[in-house]
Amino acid sequence: MNKIALIQLSIAMAIFGSIGLFSRLTGLPAIELIFVRSICATLFLLAVWLLTRTYKKETWDKRELLMITLCGVSNLFNWIFLFKAFEVISITVAISLYHIGPILMLVVGAMIYREKLSRGIMIAMFACFVGTIFIMGTDVFTAETPNWQGISYGLLAAVFYASTMLLGTTFHKTSVYMTTLIQMFTAVVLLAPFIKYDSYQHVTNTQWFYALLTGVVHTGIVYLLLYSSIRNLTPTVVSFMVFIDPAVAILLDIIIIGFLPSSLQIIGILAIFFGLFYAIRPQKKVLIPPAK
């Protein structure tokens, strides 16, 4: 297993776990915030691409560029449906539904790459998903009238998340900078006609700071780390590492806000880290005796 790629993905997921906290501080509606994030990430990635002179080494493959663009569209729908889910159902339910995505990625990835899923891997994935449910709180699912529209948004976000990550593992010719740049620029172009630009008139300097921060750090830097790492990791490992997100989110609540987790939430955190450690543990090499 590529340890550098694993560290990169861990950092990306850990940073992404704090996006909910920073997004609330921007004061912007979901779609308008996504638009700002995409613009900031595009400019940041373009600057990095030029400053590092990566453009001189760029390999232009038409088929891969098309697939990167399609991946950008999938990623945009992933964002849109997730934030739409936030608007009509509780964030806890939306995030729990969203984490069906790694399970879909694990199953579909195993089918595509013919990767055998052991019983232990399936148990570890189940532990991560249940751990997420425990962290979010099981009481949010007890509503007498389920909001099927919001649930549909959450499930669609999970589907587009899985497709985005699976597509991302197939890019090898185009640089990471250009891969991410194309995806962010695709989001800018597609969102531009639908933005309510008057939403930005009353944004304070502090709120702009947090908006720009989510654009550069939580989008530009995170997606650089993300696409750098998933090229060198199996879909199974990538599927598990996504569960760092909810664990970090609640740990930030504990450290920064002083939130006291319930016993069920503590069990959830431990279940997630059990699953993660199982997935990334060094595999034992089986020695096959030479034929006599």
Image (spheres, rainbow, N blue to C red):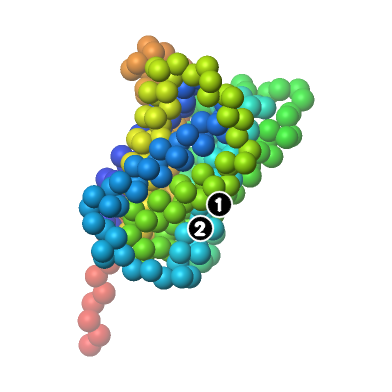
Q: Position of residue 55 (x, y in %)?
A: 29, 60
Q: Residue at x 76, y 22 (%)?
A: 144
Q: Residues within 10 Å of mark 1 (few under 14, many from 20)?
A: some
Q: Position of residue 52 (x, y in %)?
A: 23, 53
In which quadrant of the rendered view does residue 232 lie? bottom left
For the residue pair 55 and 287, the one nearer the viewer reads as 55
- The kind of residue tagged 2 is Thr
Horizontal side of 283 relative to 162 (left or right) equals left
Q: Residue at x 36, y 63 (%)?
A: 174
Give the CA separation, mark 1 to mark 2: 6 Å
| Residue sitting farthest toward the right | 145
- The kind of residue tagged 1 is Val
Residue tagged by mark 1? 73
The answer to whether residue 287 is above or below residue 186 is below
Secondary structure at badge 2 equals: helix
Q: Is residue 32 visible?
A: yes
Labels in figure, total: 2
Label placed on residue 69: 2
For the residue pair 32 and 139, the one nearer the viewer reads as 32
In which quadrant of the rendered view does residue 58 lie? bottom left
The answer to whether residue 91 is above or below residue 259 is below
